[in-house]
Image (cartoon, helix red, strand yellow):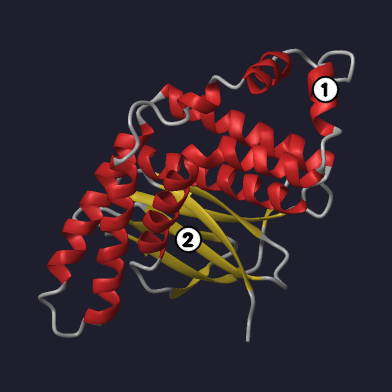
């Protein structure tokens, strides 16, 4: 069985925001699980980035709108006899659950976390070039001397307001990623181009390349077409070059 690396390209700002949030959630969860002093620092930075990102726009409202839109779209599929009704009903229930969870959040997401004194101090020091040293923030040094399980409890409490958002974003992206089937394509001399049917409202492109291939895709997309250039770069110090040979890959155009 062939293993693949998957590269994704969002086609609108909404999906781009969801992918950024997903990456922050993954970063937080990874470093929380490992739990060293350094992991704790990165987990806290992830929370601070989430706070900064969610305060710049009403992301909670955008997530709610997308959940409701997906629910409406999927409900229409229930009329089709070839649809797995059991699986569809499960997804619809999950969407309704996530909507309820987000609606239960009053006010701005993470406001209580934003008021944590230690986090506010770290955020302020993060704006200074260079890393935070012990002499910059003795309170952080002291906090890092606490037992690992105590620090983990603190971090989990600070992240808690974002838990509902984490699950909602993951569900949205899971539904989107499974909304289409892969097609087998070939990029002649490393280049591929295809038109986009504007009636389909494609939101996300997924390019899958076998792991033993030595190339990667650079994806450029507009409203009416997208292109993919497969590049090679054996030495990161040098400029990448387009592959001269044909490249076989899988393409998924996700729309719902």
Q: Position of residue 58 (x, y in %)?
A: 35, 28
Q: Quadrant of residue 121?
A: top right
Q: Is residue 209 left or right of residue 131?
A: left
Please, is residue 24 above or below residue 209 in the view?
above
Eye-nearest disc, 1 or 2: 1
Q: Position of residue 103 (x, y in %)?
A: 28, 41
Please, is residue 165 above or below residue 144 in the view?
below
Residue at horizontal 36 percent and vertical 40 percent from the top: 14
Residue at horizontal 22 percent and vertical 50 percent from the top: 68
- Image quadrant where one finds the N terminus: bottom right
- Element type at marker 2? strand
Q: Is residue 171 left or right of residue 118?
A: left
How many numbered marks are there? 2
**Which residue is denoted by mark 2 in the rendering?**
206
Q: Residues within 10 Å of mark 2 (few under 14, many from 20)?
A: some
| Residue closer to the observer: 41 or 139 | 139
Residue at horizontal 39 percent and vertical 58 percent from the top: 171
Q: Are marks 1 and 2 in contact (CB under 8 Å)?
A: no
- Element type at marker 1? loop
**Which residue is denoted by mark 1 in the rendering?**
131
Q: Position of residue 63 (x, y in %)?
A: 33, 42
Q: CA distance from mark 1 to mark 2?
A: 36 Å
Which of marks 2 and 1 precedes in the sequence? 1
């Amino acid at each position: 069985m062939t293993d693949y690396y998957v590269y994704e390209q969002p086609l609108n700002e909404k999906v781009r925001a969801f992918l950024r949030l997903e990456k922050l959630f993954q970063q937080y969860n990874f470093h929380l699980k490992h739990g060293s002093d350094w992991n704790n620092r990165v987990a806290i930075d992830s929370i601070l980035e989430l706070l900064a990102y969610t305060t710049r726009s009403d992301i909670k409202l955008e997530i709610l709108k997308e959940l409701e839109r997906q629910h409406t779209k999927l409900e229409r599929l229930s009329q089709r006899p070839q649809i797995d009704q059991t699986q569809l009903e499960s997804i619809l229930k999950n969407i309704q659950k996530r909507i309820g969870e987000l609606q239960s959040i009053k006010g701005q997401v993470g406001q209580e976390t934003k008021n944590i004194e230690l986090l506010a101090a770290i955020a302020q020091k993060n704006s200074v070039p260079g890393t935070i040293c012990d002499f910059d923030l003795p309170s952080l040094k002291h906090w890092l001397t606490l037992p690992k399980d105590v620090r983990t409890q603190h971090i989990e409490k600070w992240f808690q307001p974002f838990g509902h958002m984490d699950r909602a974003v993951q569900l949205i992206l899971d539904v989107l990623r499974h909304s289409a089937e892969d097609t087998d394509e070939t990029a002649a001399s490393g280049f591929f181009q295809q038109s986009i049917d504007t009636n389909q409202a494609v939101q996300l492109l997924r390019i899958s390349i076998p792991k033993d291939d030595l190339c990667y895709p650079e994806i450029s997309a507009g409203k009416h077409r997208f292109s993919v250039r497969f590049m090679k770069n054996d030495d990161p110090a040098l400029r990448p070059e387009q592959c001269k040979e044909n490249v076989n890959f899988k393409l998924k155009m996700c729309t719902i």
